[in-house]
Image (tube, rainbow, N blue to C red):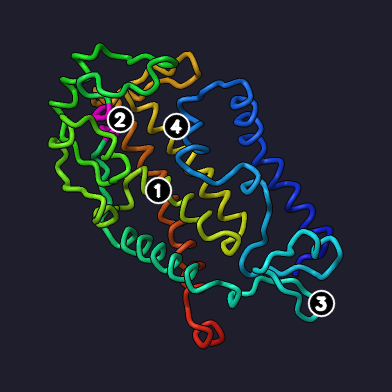
Amino acid sequence: MLTTAEWQSRAHAHLTRVQRWTLPNRERRSRGEAHPVYDFLFQYYTLSGGRLEAWHPNPHEQLEDSPEARARFSGREYRVVDGMIRRDPNALKDAERKMLGRVLQVLTATQSRAPNFACYGMHEWAMVYGGHDIRHAGIAPLRLPQAEVDALVESRPVACSHFDAFRFFAPTAQPMNRIPLAWETRYSAEQPGCIHANMDLYRWAYTAMPWVGSDLLWDCFELAAELRVLDMQAGPYDLRAMGFDPVCIETPEGRDEYQRRQRSLSARGTELRSRLIDTIGALCASPAERNQ
């Protein structure tokens, strides 16, 4: 059980670390300024900065009852029992429990598959193949001529297993992908080596808030941020003016660096996925199973 002073200290520490990301994002938005690396964390991922800043305890923690705690944790997910405030799994609506069940299925299936560490971030190159939709051209130019970008896509195996990356491929690059992907079966190829599947752990964590708690949510956000940096460093854009040196996957040395970092980040993702599976699995259990 956390005392009022303990949880307030934790909440303050959480706010401080999160605002290192949310405040610059708000400032950029107020100036109409785009960031080709970090905006992704607040646009593709739809959790608001305010909700990311709001602290919630871990699943096994409860708070001593106090006016401060009642004012802050007044949602239907929380209830007061014997001088303590705790989350009540019975407050989950049927639709919410079904949605979490689907999340659990994706996480469990992804965790069970063999990882692939040989994609080398080619998805970003396939997106701009043939000059198609060069999204960041106004901020960051391509770091190779278009002809060399196209030649690289044509010369390397393209094996993207993440539908939300594949769907942005240039139409002429989509047939090059060695893995058949479609919206209806978009999770069937997810695997734990994929940097996008590991970034999406943040999505699954905030989908399960406040039940998973802010510590796990933050760990998933932090991993997503590091993966996004690698994703863009290995891409075709020149981001050196913004402080990001390229990972030149067109060279053997660059591919080695990409794979080394990908493996390290994937190991962290595997651990976070296990934590999410355990926490969401407990939520999806029947009342009788939870009480065992």
**Identity of the amino acid at label 2?**
Glu
Magenta stretch encompasses residue 124: yes
> How far apart are the alpha carbons under marks 2 and 3?
53 Å
State if disc 4 and disc 1 touch (CB < 8 Å): no
Main secondary structure along the magenta-highlighted residues: helix
Residue identifier under label 1: 198
Vertical relation: 18 (above or below) 28: below
User: Could you classify mark 4 by the number of other residues whose Cα lies within 10 Å: few (under 14), some (14-19), or many (20 or more)?
Assistant: some
- Front disc: 2 or 1: 2
Position in image of residue 33 (x %, y %): 55, 21
- Mark closer to the chain start, 2 or 1: 2
State if disc 4 and disc 2 touch (CB < 8 Å): no
**Identity of the amino acid at label 4?**
Val
Residue visible at 44% across and 32% down in the picture: 229
- Mark closer to the chain start, 2 or 4: 2
Position in image of residue 153 (x %, y %): 18, 26
Magenta-highlighted residues: 120-127
Which disc, if any, is residue 83?
A: 3
Residue identifier under label 2: 124
User: Which of the 4 quarters of the picture holds residue 108?
Assistant: bottom left
**Identity of the amino acid at label 1?**
Asn
Q: Quadrant of the N terminus?
A: bottom right
- Front disc: 3 or 1: 3
